[in-house]
């Protein structure tokens, strides 16, 4: 595991909102939410609304890296990315985990886990950059293995980022977030 402090957790939120309007942290659980009607994270951005943590200080371009965290998604949340690995070659990301109608999916395609609402799940995303491979574990069980989408520099993000067919309010709660790297 790498060493993390609060400075590694950089909040990206609607530019016209104070942090407290879309994020809370009680020392254990990070509660992160956004409305589909919110503004993007900067006035110049044409992206959809988001409130996400960008894990800073551990951008990577080689090796084997792992994101781990426990997530809780309330049943009213749909049409949202809750975790991503930024840095694809032809797209902004090389992996995204979306929630649609209670199912966790790879982007809006392959199912990863059903019935994710209203329960804590441990999510592990392992990125082997050299092999251009991702493996996703849910509660210790291998649920997905897919190729990466290229890119030269990557980092982890988690929270809520509006996607297609979004609910009016999207939320995810996270605890025990860690980053690990293989030496």
Image (tube, rainbow, N blue to C red):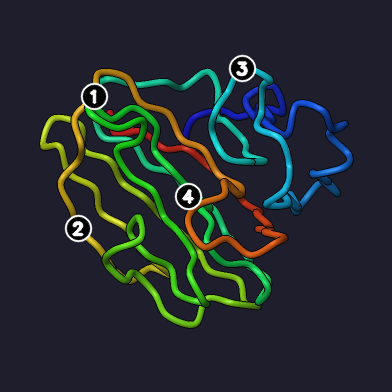
Quick one: SS at disc 2? strand
Q: Nearer the viewer, mark 1 or mark 2?
A: 1
> In terms of sequence position, does the residue under pointer 3 or pointer 2 come before the other?
3
CA separation, marks 4 and 3?
32 Å
CA separation, marks 3 and 2?
35 Å
CA separation, marks 1 and 2?
18 Å
> In terms of sequence position, does the residue under pointer 4 or pointer 1 come before the other?
4
Q: In the drawing, what numbered circle is on residue 68?
A: 4
Q: Residues within 10 Å of mark 2 (few under 14, many from 20)?
A: some
> In terms of sequence position, does the residue under pointer 2 or pointer 4 come before the other?
4
Q: Position of residue 133 (x, y in %)?
A: 17, 44
Which residue is farthest bottom? 115
The residue identified by callout 1 is 151
CA separation, marks 2 and 4?
16 Å
CA separation, marks 3 and 1?
24 Å
The residue identified by callout 2 is 145
Looking at the figure, which quarter contains the C terminus?
A: top left
User: Relative to residue 42, is residue 105 depicted above or below?
Assistant: below
Q: Residues within 10 Å of mark 1 (few under 14, many from 20)?
A: some
Q: Are marks 4 and 3 in contact (CB under 8 Å)?
A: no
């Amino acid at each position: 595991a790498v060493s993390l402090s609060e400075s590694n957790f950089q909040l990206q939120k609607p530019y016209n909102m104070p942090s407290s309007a879309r994020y809370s942290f009680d020392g254990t659980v990070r509660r992160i939410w956004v409305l589909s009607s919110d503004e993007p994270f900067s006035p110049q951005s044409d992206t959809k609304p988001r409130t996400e943590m960008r894990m800073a200080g551990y951008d990577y371009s080689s090796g084997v890296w792992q994101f781990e965290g426990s997530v809780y998604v309330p049943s009213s949340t749909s049409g949202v990315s809750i975790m991503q690995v930024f840095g694809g070659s032809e797209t902004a990301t090389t992996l995204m985990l979306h929630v649609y109608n209670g199912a966790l999916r790879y982007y809006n395609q392959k199912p990863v886990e059903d019935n994710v609402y209203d329960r804590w799940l441990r999510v592990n995303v392992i990125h082997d950059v050299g092999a251009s491979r991702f493996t996703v574990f849910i509660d210790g069980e291998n649920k997905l293995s897919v190729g990466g989408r290229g890119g030269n520099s990557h980092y982890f993000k988690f929270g809520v980022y509006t996607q297609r067919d979004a609910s009016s309010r999207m939320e995810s709660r996270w605890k025990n977030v860690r980053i690990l790297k293989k030496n």
